[in-house]
Amino acid sequence: MKKKVLFVASLFLATATFAQDGLTSKKGEAFLPEAGDWALGFDGTPFLNYAGNWFSGYTGQNSVNATWVGNTPSATIVGKYFKDESTAYRAKVRIGFGSTTTNNIHDTSTTTLTGEIEDEMSTSSFNLTLGGGIEKRKGNTRIQGFYGGEILISFGSSSSEFTYADAGSGTFAGANVHTATWTDNFATGTTTTSNGERNLEITNGSTFQLALRGFIGVEWFLAPKVSVAAEYGWGLAMSSTGEGERDTEEYTVSTGATDLSTVQRKHTTGSSSAFGIDTDNNGGVITIMFHF
């Protein structure tokens, strides 16, 4: 919080170089948006943290990164079109793709294999959010109040695939029965030595979300057509998650057989739905806007 206060204070001092009539600069440039103007903005919190670190002398690793936190992404793109000086149409968009590969190298010297082998988990995700609404503005100075409503539609999906180096095979009645060694938890890197059931692929159910929200906020024009805005919202959200699927394999001995064989199965996860009415942005969202 102190970092943000320091940065905002520096912006206030910087604006002292402009004319103090409130609405135009010394060059005659208008501070406030006009009819026909477009605006482009993004979540300014990562930049405020970074600048606050610079002013306070903090040398940590708070860089300007675009990170996703739940359904509230940083660096969200916000666009506006001003119908007139007090009315704007606004739009939001988020298109996110993600892919992560996790490798786990483990020792198999205690089994019939020797040396180190490597298992792999590949995870991919997709997120899409589209939103639109209308904004009304109030105020005759460089500090403007605004309010309005918008609708947002979101879609998300994710899946993981697993590859194991140790297949696990052998003769049950023979002297060299081979029990597979494989990663049972990629997050911790732990392994198990067994012929039990293990995941091959996990496809999570796709999630669809619809949100209707009202919003209210304050926007400060610190330079001609450049502003910093803080916004809070209230509304309802409905979400639906479809059924997922988990593909597994297990090395076992079928009834009456003497050799290990692969048994593959499909497991279905249940669907879910949710509904809620509440405030949002309780941590505060600061948006930097450029008008042109």
Image (cartoon, helix red, strand yellow):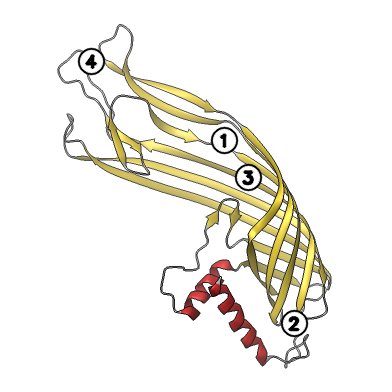
Q: Decide if residue 193 is on the left or right side of residue 223.
A: left
Kindly tell me whether residue 292 is visible in this rendering.
no
Label 4 close to label 3 by CB (< 8 Å): no
Q: Mark 1 points at which residue?
A: 205
Q: Can the viewer see residue 74 in this picture?
A: yes
User: Which element type, helix, strand or loop, lies under badge 3?
Assistant: strand
Label 2 environment density (alpha carbons within 10 Å; few <14, some 14–19, many ≥20): many
**Residue at the extreme top of the image, as rendered:** 256
| Picture residue at 30% right of the left edge, 43% below the top | 104
Mark 1 Cα within 10 Å, few/some/many (few <14, many 20+)?
many
Of callouts 1 and 3, the N-terminal one: 3
Quadrant where the N terminus is found in the figure: bottom right
The structure residue drawn at horizontal position 66% and vertical position 68%, both measured from the top left corner, is 41
Q: Position of residue 262 (x, y in %)?
A: 34, 21
Q: Name the residue under label 2.
A: 31
Q: Earlier in the sequence, mark 4 or mark 2?
A: 2
Q: In which quarter of the image is the C terminus?
A: bottom right
On the image, the x and y values in percent for residue 252 come to 32, 18
- Identified by mark 3, the residue type is Phe
Mark number for residue 253?
Answer: none
Q: Distance between the residues labelled 1 and 3?
A: 11 Å
Residue in the foreground of this view, choosing between 166 and 187: 187
User: Which comes sooner in the sequence, label 4 or label 1?
Assistant: 4
Alpha carbon distance from label 4 to label 3: 48 Å
Label 2, label 3: how many angstroms apart (C-alpha)? 38 Å
- Tell me the tag on residue 172: 4
